[in-house]
Amino acid sequence: MRTPLRSASGVRTWILAGALWVSALAVASCQGDKPGGGAIPPLEVVATVETEPAPHAGDAADDPVIWVHPTDPEMSTIIGTNKKGGLAVYDLTGRQIQYLPDGGMNNVDLRAGFPLAGQSVTLVTAGNRSHNSIAIYRVDPATRRLENVAARVVTTLEAYGSCMYRSRTTGKYYYFVNSKTGNVEQWELFDNGRGRVDAVKVRGFAVGSQTEGCVADDELGHFYIAEETVGIWKYGAEPNAPTGRLSVDQAGGGRLVADVEGLTIAYGPEGTGYLIASSQGNSTYVLYRREGDNAFVKAFRVVRGSGIDAVSDTDGIDVTTANLGPAFPSGVFVAQDGRNDAGNQNYKLVPWHHIVHK
C-alpha cells in the first residue's frame, strides 16, 4: 500500500509506504555480490515510454529533471537539456509541450518552494554554455511551461555540469556549477526584491580533473560530484562546509566504468533511499545506499523491450519516487539515451518499481 508521506523540504516529492521501501532495501542489499565474491550481472529493465527526439542531430540531449505537478501527478513533466539549442519540456507520454531556444543548455535541476514575489514557486536552473551563465526559470503549474525569471545574466566559471541545493538549516537555495577543469562554484539564489531571481557566489573549490554530473542531498546536507575518469566524491553542501571529501566509488577498480556521468537521488523515509550514478563506459547505472557510507546495492541496465530500443552512453539521469499515476505508480527513472534507434537522441522512462523491487 502506498501512503502519502512528507515532502523533502522542496526536494522532489516521494510517496511510498515505509514498510514497502524498507523491504525493498533489504532485498536489494543482498544483490550486490554472490557468495564467494562473484559479481551478479546487472539487472535488466525496459523503458515503457520514450520522449520525442531532440530537435538537433548529434550529441544534443544531455540531462533531464522531473517536475512533479503539485495537485495532479499525472500532469508531471520531464525537462530535458539540448546542448545545441535550449530546453525541452515533455509530458509523461513523451510528447514535447515546450521548447525554449535559449542557448546551449548542459545540465538542469529544480527545487520547489522558492519564495518569489510573495509566491512559492518551483525554480528551474540550467547551465547555459553559450555564455557561461545561469539560466533561471519558474514552472507555471497551470500551463506546465517554463517562464524566465532571471534578474540578469549571471556569469559563472566555464559552465559544464550543474545542480541545485536547498539548505535544511537555513532554507536558502543554491546553484552548483562545475567545469571541465574540475573547478566548482556555489551560488546563492534569491529574490532581488522585484520578483526576479539573482545570485551571488558564496564558495569555490577544486575537485581535480574533468567533472560534470552532480547532485545535492537536501535532507542530509551532502554534495556529490562525478569526476569523470576517477569516480564519485562526497562533500558537504553548505557554503561554509570544509572542502574535505570522501570517495563513494571509483572508475576502474570499483563499480564504475569511465566516464562517470549523471548522478541523482531517490529519496526514501528517514534518510534512506539511493544515490544513483550513470556508468557511461558500460551503459549501466549503479545504485548505492543514500545513508551512511553509500554502500553498493546493485547495478542495472535498460535493454530493448516494449517496442523501445535499449539505452546506451547515458549522460544525465533523474528519478522521483512520487506516485505519478497508473503508468508510474511508484515513481519513474529517466535516462538520456546517447544512441536512440529512432533518430536523434532522446530520454527513456522506466517505472521505478521495475528497478527497486527486483
Image: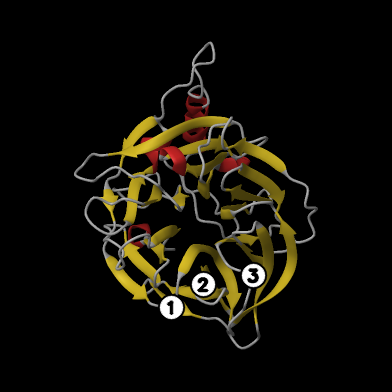
Task: Quadrant for residue 70, please give it.
Answer: bottom left
Q: Secondary structure at mark 2?
A: strand
Q: Amino acid at mark 1?
A: Asp
Q: Earlier in the sequence, mark 3 or mark 1?
A: 1
Q: Are marks 1 and 2 in contact (CB under 8 Å)?
A: yes
Disc 3 to disc 1, how far (Cα)?
19 Å
Determine which of the numbered discs, if any, sits on residue 157 in the image: 3
Determine which of the numbered discs, if any, sits on residue 102 in the image: 1
Disc 2 to disc 3, how far (Cα)?
11 Å
The image shows residue 306 at horizontal and vertical percentages of 21, 41
Q: Secondary structure at mark 1?
A: loop
Q: Amino acid at mark 3?
A: Leu
Q: Earlier in the sequence, mark 2 or mark 3?
A: 2
The image shows residue 203 at horizontal and vertical percentages of 75, 65
Is the N terminus in the top left, top right, bottom left or bottom right quadrant?
A: top left
| x 27%, y 50%: residue | 49
- Kindly identify which residue carries mark 2: 128
